[in-house]
Amino acid sequence: MILGLESSCDETAAAVITPDGRILSNVVSSQADLHARYGGVVPEVASRRHLELVTPVLQESLAEAETSLDDVELIGVTAGPGLIGALLVGVAAAKAIAWARRLPLAAVDHLQGHVASLYLEPDPVEPPFLCLLASGGHTLLLDVQGRGDKARVLGTTLDDAAGEAFDKGARLLGLGYPGGAEIDRIAREGDPRAYEFPVARVPGLDFSFSGLKTALLHAVKELPPEELERRRADLAASYQRAIVRALVERTRQAAEQTGATRFAVVGGVAANSELRVSLPEAAAAPLALCTDNAAMIASAARFTRTIPYPGYLGLDAYASTA
Ligand SMILES: Nc1ncnc2c1ncn2[C@@H]1O[C@H](COP(=O)(O)OP(=O)(O)OP(=O)(O)O)[C@@H](O)[C@H]1O
Ligand SMILES: [Mg+2]
């Protein structure tokens, strides 16, 4: 069995999967409530909370899988990119367990983890495919040729990530953190054509979301405060539509350019209901595997070079991929 650990941002997560990709447990403890009052993740607060949660979350994942460390053959842990203090908690925990049990360890790239959410049972997706990875920190169009390969980047965001655009938009609309799911929920009651928000067209296959956020800011400012309540759903629906259109247009364009016939969407924004409806041809992981979780990290560990005992003791986390 493979034990996965994830602590790159504000989810402390542990999961147990089988080598052929069946999920036996997938425990995610979100710190969202802890950070909500700040309107975003406070790195130092996140690290400290990971430290408190890592052991109970790990124990719960083993208990739920009805197994013990005796059955674990490989440990996969997110080594980056993410918040460095947060990552270090997961990496230190993984090293300690692997060392004590003389197990091999796989240092998993978080973004490869998102892609590997597609390789889990019961409906695994086989490369090649064009993958839209849209999360809180990244927006990437990837040409995925093989499960273990590093994907070729076809396009990325020049400023905010799609999830970040959702979160910042939610804040402007006075909704909670994290904002994507809130906008998704409220947008269902609004008219997506009420406001004409711009979809940036930057050259190539890149994205840009900062202008959209400014457009929403102006639209909100122009409203008398008592009107915001009444127009919130329309604003949310129009804003969401603009983000989704940008993502869908670019993905289709990339498919045309590369001749890709198969698509997939991963990352937290892949949970968005409008995006899922607007790209019906795309494979998408189940909702629980879109936002950060450790099952996807354990999945990626299967296709990542493993470091034999005790070679990983000097392993470092990395905040960003240079
Ligand atoms: N239903 C939804 N609609 C739109 N966005 C959503 C939805 N659910 C979650 N999100 C967004 O997904 C993001 C979180 O996704 P994820 O956990 O994959 O990101 P992250 O791990 O913080 O970033 P990264 O993977 O880039 O390091 C948040 O920005 C959140 O607003
Ligand atoms: Mg993520």
Image (cartoon, rainbow, N blue to C red):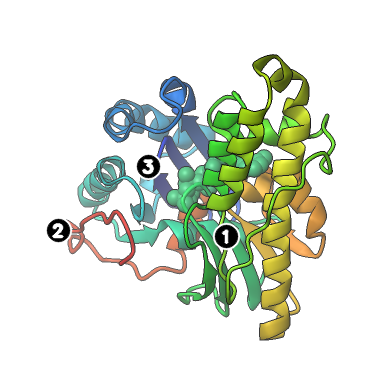
Q: Which mark is residue 314?
A: 2
Q: What's the residue at 46%, 69% (across, down)?
A: 303
Q: Residue furthest left?
A: 314
Closer to us: 272 or 58: 272
Identified by mark 2, the residue type is Gly
Circle 1 crowding by C-alpha within 10 Å: few under 14, some 14–19, many from 20: many
| Mark 1 sits near ligand 1, with its Cβ under 8 Å away | yes
Q: Quadrant of residue 57?
A: top left
- Is 272 left, or right, of 115 in this rendering? right
Dot 3: what SS? loop
Q: In screen coordinates, is 235 left or right of 109?
A: right
Of the residues shown, which amino acid type is indicated by label 1? Answer: Leu
Q: Is residue 288 visible?
A: no
* Residue 234: x %, y % from top left: 78, 33
Q: Earlier in the sequence, mark 1 or mark 2?
A: 1
Q: In the image as oriented, which residue stretches furthest toward the top?
A: 226
Q: Which mark is residue 7?
A: 3
Q: Earlier in the sequence, mark 3 or mark 2?
A: 3
The numbered disc on residue 118 is none
Q: Secondary structure at mark 1?
A: strand
Q: Is residue 290 above or below residue 37?
A: below
- Of tags 3 and 2, the one toward the viewer is 3
